[in-house]
Image (cartoon, rainbow, N blue to C red):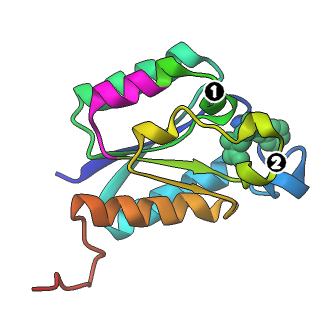
Amino acid sequence: MAKTIYVLNGPNLNMLGTREPEIYGRATLADVEKLCADTAACFGLTADCRQSNREGELIDFIHDAHAKRAAGIVINAGGYSHTSIALHDALVAAGIPTVEVHISNIHAREAFRHHSFTASAAFASLCGFGIDGYRLAIDGLAARIGAVKSGEKVKS
Ligand code: CA2
């Protein structure tokens, strides 16, 4: 059976494509989720994409990923990235290879966005690539967990 990766998006990301296109672009969350599903499929992976505006529900998603033995997590915790020790703790406890994504370059924005609690629970972080960051994150996650692109040979 195909391995599953969880793609988790946090608060306000359901609003993508409706406001602040100069920062977040014009793609919608549905576009992001399709990009993730298509990219994951290239590696023979299934993407379980979820979004919540509630911190506790995002923690429940991480617990679910652990219970279901997910192969990886891609997370954009939105504003909670900068505030949530609870999300950090859930990711560490889950022990699942995780990549953090931010659509915008958080380091080129307000000082309160420069620190991310979720970053230190991830093996890699990407920011500033727009929604392409999700594709790059899945690419890197696939390499980390040994998922090979269909049609590509494993190097000996
Ligand atoms: O750059 C990112 O991906 C962020 O995680 C997005 C968060 C922000 O709080 C982080 O600092 C960086 C906010 C997401 C809000 O998304 C919206 C998009 C369009 C319209 C309204 C909100």
Considering only vertical position in the picture, is 44 above or below 66?
below
Percent across and percent down for residue 52 are: 60, 26
Dot 2 amino acid type: Arg
Segment tinted magenta in the rendering: 88-97
Q: Residue at x 38, y 30 (%)?
A: 91
Report the side of 113 relative to 138 (left or right). right
Q: Image quadrant of residue 142?
A: bottom left
Q: Secondary structure at mark 1?
A: helix
Residue denoted by label 1: 80
Q: Quadrant of ligand 1?
A: top right
Dot 1 amino acid type: Tyr
Q: Answer yes or no: disc 2 within 8 Å of ligand 1.
A: yes
Number of the label disc, if any, that sits on residue 11: none
Q: Image quadrant of residue 13?
A: top right
Residue denoted by label 2: 109
Q: Residue at x 75, y 56 (%)?
A: 27
Q: Main secondary structure of the magenta part?
A: helix
Residue 44 visible from this viewpoint: no
Residue 43 visible from this viewpoint: yes
